[in-house]
Amino acid sequence: MGSGSALAPAAGGPASLAARLAGRARRLTAGWNIETRMGVVIVGVLILISLLAPLISPARPDTISILDALKGPSLAHPFGTDYVGRDVLSRTLYGARIDLLVVFTVTYIGLIVGGLAGMLAGYFGGWVDSLVGRAADSAIAFPFIILVLVVITITGSGLRGIGIGIILVGWALYARLARSEMLSLREEQFMIATRSLGYSHWRSIFRHALPNVIRSSLIYSTVDILVNLLVIAAMSYLGFGAQEPSPDLGGLIASGQPYLLNAWWITTLPGIFVVLFGFGISLIGDGLSHGDVSVGIR
Amino acid sequence: MSAYLARRIGITLLQLLVLSIVAFFLIHLAPGDPVRTMLGPRASPHEIDLVRQQLGLTRALPLQYGGFIGGILTGHFGNDFVYSQSVSSLIAPRAGISAELIAGGLIVSMIIGVPLALVAAVRANSAVDHGVRALVTLLFAMPSFWVGLILALVFALKLKWLPSSGYSDASIGSLIRSLVLPCVALGLSILAVVVRTLRGSVREVLRTEYVEAARARGYGSARVLLRHVLRNAAMPTATVLAVNAGLLIGGTVVIEQVFQIAGLGSLLFDAVERRDYLVVEYLTVLAGSAIVLLSFAVDLAQVVIDPRVSLVRGHG
């Protein structure tokens, strides 16, 4: 917020804005049950600490200190150190930052592309519908992880290939969801009204249908984020993700495998981040769907 | 029934066709030159041309696709450049190992999942149900390779009960011992799918009249549950599992790497790492076909076992 009396004439502005935001936040969270609230807290805290990694991590993730190599968890190094003495907690936070950035990006690109395609398919029907439908069917029929591996074969290692592979499959389920929502929505009174009033297709779809179509996709995106995070972690465990010196979580876990017996903390502790995040995001999804909408798991 | 069958076979064939086309063109139309990538930067243009001719990459694309399909249908996948041996001889001995892994993973997920789902469904919305759900959700959030590594740490390296890596079929005992940990890791990764679907369908069946009738006849609750409920709830779960077979097949790539098992998954991993396009192409089609055929088999079994299915779907 601004400081000093120079802003005094506008004081009502920020205050009422803050009040409005608070009111909006309260309304948004009012329908949340205990599961959703718990999930939001867990996921929020994890996102926060990974975003703040440069500020709060105990050490630089790439500072080598051979004398401290393979030290177990202690106050100075809560997650211990790796084979060249790097702080595993710091490496976990930095790795998580990469993974979260990638997973949110690819998931929501998939949601936007798929949602758009599905809405258009459901709204216009005809050849648009069959085109989108066939494309979505063939994307879903492909074994997910194997398609990602095919893309990596073409692009070479790196998060870019993993991301492209995930989006190639990911959009399809959102397209199906949005299409079926749009199909039933098209028969609703208010959608028929937009047509009678002569609104443009654009206005009908984006102002009137979108807010109703998006809900199921947003709920599904919670499961999708978790599945995508697991795929990204698996790919980088295989060595196809972000490379040294700052690997993402899968690569970090893999780097501890040769020292599993003598330094169990390198492999086991970074995984806890994924598990906690996944648990939190599942709680949000379950809570939002009230446990009665069965959201498919790929 | 026959109309439904004909349509279902048609869909299956179409799916297989689309699968082969996508796998083929994804790799052949991708930017970059596969041969150049494979041979590395030091290859001379002459070498590149030679290899391209050997692999038949100079032919027109439709011809290449024809050869690719012919290879799949006849089982003669051609010679692999990287391993200089025929692709079929690479795949055949490994296929059995991966199939054992997948079957074992399924068995583990059933042994753990079915009782959990039954308890959760019978005592729906109780503390037990919530506990099962939390456990399953937690397990689903765990990366399978991470679970595998922890299992290896505890049961192989610390307790020394089981081998930490490798595959041995010298005897039944050593086979089972080498498969237990990988199969548990694989099974736990799909446990959530099993428990959630089965719990849902058991709850649905519990509400039906024939279950009520069975209870009214005074059958014990164990008998009702096992003979009437489970049998009817099994089919939807099998369908969902077939749809999710991709998870298991993809999972073997990772789990075989964790436990150093030389199955199809590790072959695919090697092929991706060496950017060996030919092997990647064939394995992709193989894995995809397995999933397509599996879901066809499950649908077929459903028609044979349960006459209601064809009646409903035949008109749909």
Image (cartoon, coloured by chain):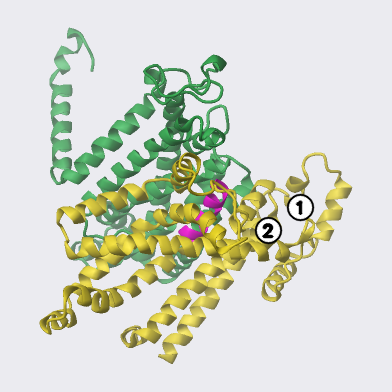
Which chain is painted in yellow? B
Residue drawn at x 56%, y 45% as measured from the top left: A161
> Residue A270: x percent and y percent?
43, 33
* Residue type highlighted by circle 1: Val
Q: Residue A5 versus residue A243: which sits nearer the camera?
A: A243
Main SS type for the magenta part? helix
| Chain for numbered disc 1 | B
Residue B130 visible in the current orientation: yes
Q: Relative to B112, say whether A31 is above or below.
A: above
Residue drawn at x 78%, y 46% as measured from the top left: B39
Image check: A24 left or right of A266?
A: left
> Residue A264: x percent and y percent?
46, 33
| Chain for numbered disc 2 | B
Which chain is painted in green? A
> Residue B152: x percent and y percent?
48, 44
- Dot 2: few (<14), some (14–19), or many (≥20) neighbours within 10 Å? many
* Region in magenta: B246-258
Tag 2 residue: B279
* Residue type highlighted by circle 2: Val
Q: Relative to A274, say whether B240 is above or below.
A: below
Q: Residue B96 versus residue B241: which sits nearer the camera?
A: B96
| Label 1: element kind | loop
- Asked if marks 2 and 1 fall on the same chain, the answer is yes
Mark 2 and mark 1: Cα distance apart in space: 9 Å
Q: Relative to A93, say whether A177 is above or below.
A: below
For the C terminus of chain A, the image quarter is: bottom left
Q: In the rendered image, which quarter is residue B124 located in?
A: bottom left
Image check: A222 left or right of A253?
A: left
Q: In the rendered image, which quarter is residue A80 located in?
A: top left
Please identify the residue farthest to the bottom as the structure is shown: B2
Tag 1 residue: B82
